[in-house]
Amino acid sequence: MTQSKTPRMTLVLAQALLVGLGLATLESCAEARAVSVTPGLVDQVHLGFGLNREGRVTPGCVASTYSLNDPIHLSMQVSGAVAGSVVQVSIRNVATQSLAWSEARPVTPGRSSLTFAIGRKLAVGRYRMETTFGGVAAGAREFVVHERRKGVR
């Protein structure tokens, strides 16, 4: 009787060891994914109607309201980007949550500037600009497109 318990006990211990190794492997994989988050920072985000000579929206051209058919641009600085990083900008209508405009661009590693030409074709309404960097939310701003006022070109 004693001999028959020993092989069973050995089998149970071997299975427990394999399950334990499997769990340890799963835990280490989860930690590796958590550490591999894209580093970096999106900074100096300017939503505006005009660009300077370098092709960026300057603080003097920043706006939160636009007349119908006004040009709308978005400029930002990106720092700490690694190879393969992507910045995505999406414009959503606040009332309907429908996507009005979207563009994704790869980012040069290190520090760089990006300017997006959102254009002149947004309809009258309230919009939310959402930015992601490496798939992580990096900021949001609301703005309004209104009818052009009479007497204003």
Image (cartoon, rainbow, N blue to C red):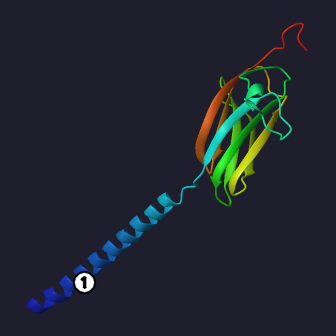
Q: Is 65 positioned to the left or the right of 138 in the image?
A: right
Q: What residue is at 67 percent from the left and 37 percent from the top?
A: 44
- Residue 33 is situated, as x and y percent measured from the top left of the image, at 50, 61
Q: Quadrant of the N terminus?
A: bottom left
Q: Which residue in the structure is indicated by mark 1?
A: 11
- Residue 7 is situated, as x and y percent measured from the top left of the image, at 20, 88
* Kind of element beneath mark 1: helix
Q: Amino acid at mark 1?
A: Leu
Image vertical order of residue 141 relative to residue 78, above or below? above
- Residue 23 is situated, as x and y percent measured from the top left of the image, at 36, 68
On the question of residue 1 being in view, the answer is: no
Q: Is 67 positioned to the left or the right of 107 in the image?
A: right
Foreground pick, 105 / 22: 105
Q: What residue is at 64 percent from the left and 59 percent from the top?
A: 82
Foreground pick, 6 / 134: 134
Image vertical order of residue 148 relative to residue 141, above or below? above
Image vertical order of residue 17 relative to residue 109, above or below? below
Q: What residue is at 73 percent from the left and 23 percent from the top?
A: 63
Q: Quadrant of residue 144?
A: top right
Q: Is 44 positioned to the left or the right of 103 in the image?
A: left
- Residue 126 is situated, as x and y percent measured from the top left of the image, at 69, 22
Q: Quadrant of residue 57?
A: top right
